[in-house]
Every structure is written in C-alpha cells, then in structure tokens.
Amino acid sequence: MPRRNYSSARRSTQKVAPAAQKRLEKVYKRWHWGEMPTHIVDCDPDFPPHLVEIGLLLELHLRPFDADRDTVFAVREDDIPHSHVGFDVDHPHQRIYFQCSHALRESGRGLYRLSEANTMSLASVAGELGEGHHANPRSGYVRTNVKPLGHLAHLVYFTHKRGDGPSGYIHEMGEEGGVPPILCVSSDGRFWLAGGSYTCPSPGITK
C-alpha cells in the first residue's frame, strides 16, 4: 500500500488559524514518531475543529452486547484512502472520531436499519451504557442520535511511523485493565464511540 501521511484534520467549513495548524502539525509529528504530515483532510462540520489523524481505517471489531465473539467490519480496499481515524487534541482524553467514506457510510446505514436497539443521543449512550472517563455525558459529545451496537474490541488502522514504515496497527480497546468504548452508528451511516478509558498520547492509543 502506498505511503499516505495526513496532517491534522479540519472542519470543511472552518479554516484553522496558522498558529493552531502549527501546533497540530507538531502533535502529528510527535504521534508519528518524527514523520511530518503531507495532507490536510476536511472533516464533517460537526466534528471538533482540531483533530490529528491516527491513520486510515482498516477494520472495526465489534463485540455485540449479547455475544462472546467479535464481528469484523473491514473497509473495502479501494475505500481505505477515504476512511480516516483521528483524535481531538483539545479533549482532555483525546476522544477518537471516524471520518467515514461514502461507501463506509452506506454499510453503516445498513447496520442502523437492521439494529433493533433504541435510538439514543450519543451523550446518553455514554452516560447510561458507557464506563471510564469518556462516559461523562457533559464532556462535549457531538449532538447526534445513534444506536449502540456493542463494544469496540479492536481498532485496526494503517499509517506511517518513523522506524516502522507504512504499517497496519491493531489496537485492543480496553487492554491492560481499561474499559472498551461502545461502538455506535447514526442514521446517516457514521460510526461513533461513546464511553471507554482510552487516550491517545504520543506512543499511540492506550487502553
């Protein structure tokens, strides 16, 4: 797979000030172990304004609430360059967001239609079903209604980190005694995380 380095994401309707952009590029460089960003990715307008890309989304491993086995949602190969994972550098725990491609959203819309879960606000899912420091419903969740699907067991992404080269990474959510977040989907097919105890410091996603 060709090398693809993306810089801090930004809202499609809002330009990032030069000083903020410089700070985001510094965070990106530290997170990717010295690699500099080469692209800027426009994000959905309701996302936080200061996101830094973790990598390109490859797979979401869902563990439904009533199951003991994971369901794997793999991003189609030709859709990977348009599916991104980023974190909010302004949030105290670096909350993760998914910038979903059109094809990935179509899959998400199908999941939403098939799900028998009740529709809830994202903040309500965090407050009622979530655990960990991301479960506070007053902690800046985007105002959107979703259906909770289960816990996100693993997150698989592709990126370039100095020393590793272009590589795929798989992170077990909730490892080392942490709490895995809840994977949700909205009616427009976007995927969201609620709850959990993960953070995104310089070494990568933890817990």
Image (cartoon, helix red, strand yellow):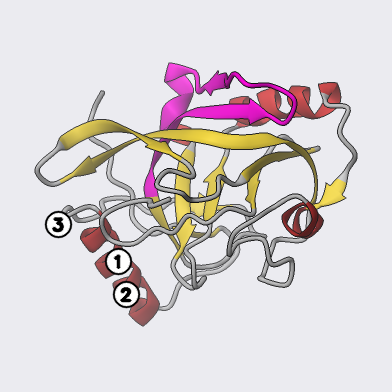
Quarter of the picture holding the N terminus: top left
| Residue beneath disc 2 | 23
Q: Which callout, 2 or 1, points to the residue nearer the camera?
A: 1
Amino acid at dot 1: Val
Are the residues flagged by discs 2 and 1 in contact, CB closer than 8 Å?
Answer: yes
> Residue visible at 36% across and 78% down?
18
Residue 53 horizontal/vertical position (percent): 39, 51
| Residue beneath disc 1 | 27
Amino acid at dot 3: Gly
> Residue visible at 29% across and 66% down?
27
Cα distance between the residues tagged 3 and 1: 10 Å
| Residue beneath disc 3 | 34
Give the crowd class for mark 3: few <14, some 14-19, many >=20 residues within 10 Å. some
Viewer-nearest residue: 36 or 152: 152
Determine the secondary structure under disc 2.
helix
Amino acid at dot 2: Arg
Determine the secondary structure under disc 1.
helix
Cα distance between the residues tagged 3 and 2: 14 Å
Look at the image and give the residue range highlighted in magenta. Answer: 54-81
